[in-house]
C-alpha cells in the first residue's frame, strides 16, 4: 500500500542545487521524480536532514528542505519537501524592465521606490 498523498511523476533532469549555508555549497543533481509537494533528487554526496536547498531550473526556482537521504546505486537519494516555487522568472523580469529603465538602469530598492511613488 502506498501512503503518499500525491502521485509521483518520474523525471530524469539535471539541475543545479545550492545547499544553503553558511557557506552555501553547489552540487549538480538529477531529479528522479516529482509531485506537488516534493521531489526526489539523486545527489553525489549525502545531504543532512533539515538542510534548506535552492534548486535552479531554466525559468524556475524551488526552495525546499531535505526530509531524508539514503544510499542508493553508489550515490545518494534525497527526498525534498518543497516550501516555495517561483515559476516564470523570465516573464517577471520582462514585466519589471520598465521600472528599471525609469530608475536609470539602477537596481531598484523596493522600499525607496515605494516611498517615492507614494510621496
Image: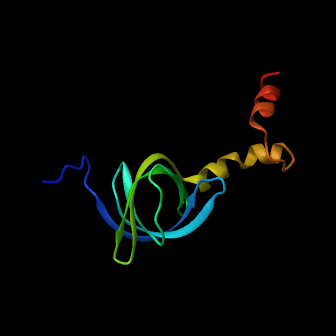
Furthest-left residue in view? 1
Q: Is residue 94 left or right of residue 76?
A: right
Q: Residue at x 75, y 46 (%)?
A: 98
117, above or below 78, in the image: above
Q: Residue at x 84, y 50 (%)?
A: 105
Q: Is residue 86 left or right of residue 3?
A: right
Relative to the observer, which residue lies in front, 40 or 62? 40
30, above or below 86, in the image: below
Task: Give the colour scheme of this rendering.
Answer: rainbow
Furthest-right residue in view? 104
Q: Is residue 91 left or right of residue 101?
A: left
Measured as percent of width and height from the top left, residue 25 is found at 61, 62
Measured as percent of width and height from the top left, residue 24 is found at 64, 58
101, above or below 111, in the image: below
**Quarter-wise, where is residue 70 in the image?**
bottom left
**Quarter-wise, where is residue 33 in the image?**
bottom left
Q: Residue at x 38, y 52 (%)?
A: 38
Q: How many numbered marks appear?
A: 0
Relative to the observer, which residue lies in front, 85 or 59? 85
Q: Is residue 112 left or right of residue 35?
A: right
The image quadrant where one finds the N terminus is: bottom left
The image quadrant where one finds the C terminus is: top right
Relative to the observer, which residue lies in front, 59 or 83? 83
Amino acid at each position: 500500500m502506498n501512503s503518499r498523498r500525491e502521485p509521483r511523476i518520474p523525471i530524469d533532469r539535471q539541475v543545479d542545487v545550492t545547499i544553503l549555508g553558511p557557506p552555501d555549497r553547489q552540487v549538480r543533481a538529477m531529479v528522479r521524480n516529482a509531485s506537488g509537494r516534493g521531489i526526489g533528487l539523486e545527489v553525489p554526496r549525502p545531504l543532512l536532514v533539515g538542510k534548506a536547498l535552492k534548486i535552479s531550473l531554466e525559468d524556475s526556482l524551488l526552495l525546499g528542505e531535505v526530509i531524508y537521504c539514503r544510499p542508493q546505486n553508489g550515490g545518494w537519494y534525497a527526498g525534498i519537501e518543497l516550501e516555495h516555487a517561483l515559476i516564470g522568472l523570465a516573464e517577471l523580469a520582462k514585466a519589471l524592465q520598465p521600472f528599471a529603465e525609469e530608475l536609470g538602469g539602477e537596481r531598484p530598492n523596493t522600499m525607496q521606490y515605494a516611498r517615492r511613488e507614494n510621496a
